[in-house]
Image (cartoon, rainbow, N blue to C red):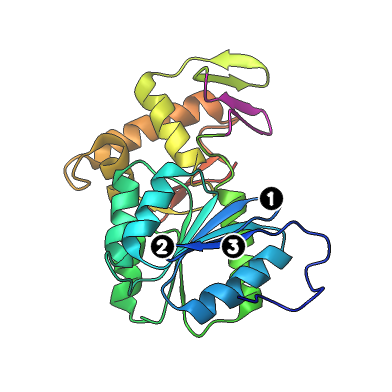
């Protein structure tokens, strides 16, 4: 099977294998999983991502996509909604329930507002409809990779005066240790792994506490205020953990 144009990939390493509807393309940098049942799109998008320097694994059904996502560390997951075996909405939900926190981009022909809302509420970080502009898609991928660069495999996060050592569960501000409770640390880690993304109160409470957002909204506000007191230079005018009016919070670090 031929993929791409001869000579178009330069000296980048490339290994292609097709087993049980899975195709893998090994590049040099971030590892992306594309779950898509349309073969032509897998080939075209795979070539483009490889040219951008990414390593790409493909699965053409939801069941295979789930198994790969929980067994291999990816930096980004791109998935269709209309998948055989397990649809993209269910896959997105199940990955979040399984503790997979990498950015998820839904790429689909379903373009209703309801579908977009459902996808985002189930844990997707972005939603693009087909047909799409390839340059815009690549730009969206780059943005999600920047947001999601704090992953389980990354031990230390540092931005400005704040340093977080995930393995040691240690937080420092300008080199001075900051004492956080276990719950405060869990909330901070959750926000960091989604930095730059506006998160609703309901979603944060559900993902971090397992609470109903309407009933326990005050709990979140109290913990956010506590983190601001400990991390912000000026807690009354926060620059790290900012309020998103009408939605919830966003980490800007």
Judge whether 171 appears above or below 54 on screen.
above
Of residues 27 and 167, which is closer to you in this image? 27
Disc 1 from disc 3: Cα separation: 13 Å
Q: Residue at x 33, y 71 (%)?
A: 83
Q: Earlier in the sequence, mark 1 or mark 3?
A: 1
- Categorize mark 1 by other alpha carbons within 10 Å: few (<14), some (14-19), many (20+): few
Q: Residue at x 26, y 37 (%)?
A: 218
Residue for badge 3: 141
Q: Which mark is residue 29?
A: 1
Is 54 magenta? The answer is no
Of tags 1 and 3, which is closer to the observer?
1
- Residue 123 shows in this picture: no
Q: Please tell me whether mark 2 sits on a helix, a strand or a loop.
A: loop
Please, which residue is most extreme toward the bottom here? 131
- The x, y position of residue 8, in whole percent, is 79, 73
Disc 3 from disc 2: Cα separation: 26 Å
Q: Residue at x 66, y 71 (%)?
A: 47
- The x, y position of residue 144, in whole percent, is 56, 56
Q: Do the residues labelled 3 and 2 touch (CB within 8 Å)?
A: no
- Count of residue discs: 3
Residue extent of the magenta highlight: 154-167
From the viewer's perspective, tell me whether residue 139 is left or right of residue 115: right
- Residue 9 shows in this picture: yes
Q: Are marks 1 and 3 in contact (CB under 8 Å)?
A: no
Residue for badge 2: 20
């Amino acid at each position: 099977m031929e993929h791409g144009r001869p000579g178009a990939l330069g000296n980048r390493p490339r290994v292609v294998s097709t087993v049980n509807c899975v195709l893998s393309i090994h590049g040099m940098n971030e590892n992306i999983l594309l779950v898509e049942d349309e073969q032509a799109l897998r080939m075209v998008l795979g070539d483009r991502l490889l040219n951008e320097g990414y390593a790409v694994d493909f699965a053409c059904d939801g069941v295979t996509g789930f198994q790969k996502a929980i067994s291999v560390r990816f930096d980004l997951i791109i998935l269709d909604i209309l998948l055989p075996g397990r649809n993209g909405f269910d896959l997105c939900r199940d990955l979040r329930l399984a503790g997979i926190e990498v950015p998820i981009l839904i790429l689909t022909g379903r373009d209703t507002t309801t579908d977009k809302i459902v996808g985002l509420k189930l844990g997707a970080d972005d939603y693009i409809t087909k047909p799409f502009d390839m340059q815009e898609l690549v730009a969206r991928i780059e943005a999600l990779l920047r947001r999601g660069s704090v992953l389980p495999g990354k031990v230390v996060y540092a931005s400005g005066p704040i340093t977080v050592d995930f393995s040691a569960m240690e937080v420092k501000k300008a080199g001075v240790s900051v004492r956080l409770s276990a719950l405060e640390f869990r909330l901070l880690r959750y926000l960091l792994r989604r930095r730059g993304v506006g998160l609703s109160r309901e979603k944060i409470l559900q993902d971090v506490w397992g609470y109903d957002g309407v009933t326990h909204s005050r709990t979140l506000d109290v913990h956010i205020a506590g983190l601001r007191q400990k991390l912000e230079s000026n807690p009354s005018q926060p620059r790290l953990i900012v309020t998103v009016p009408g939605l919830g919070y966003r980490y800007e670090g």
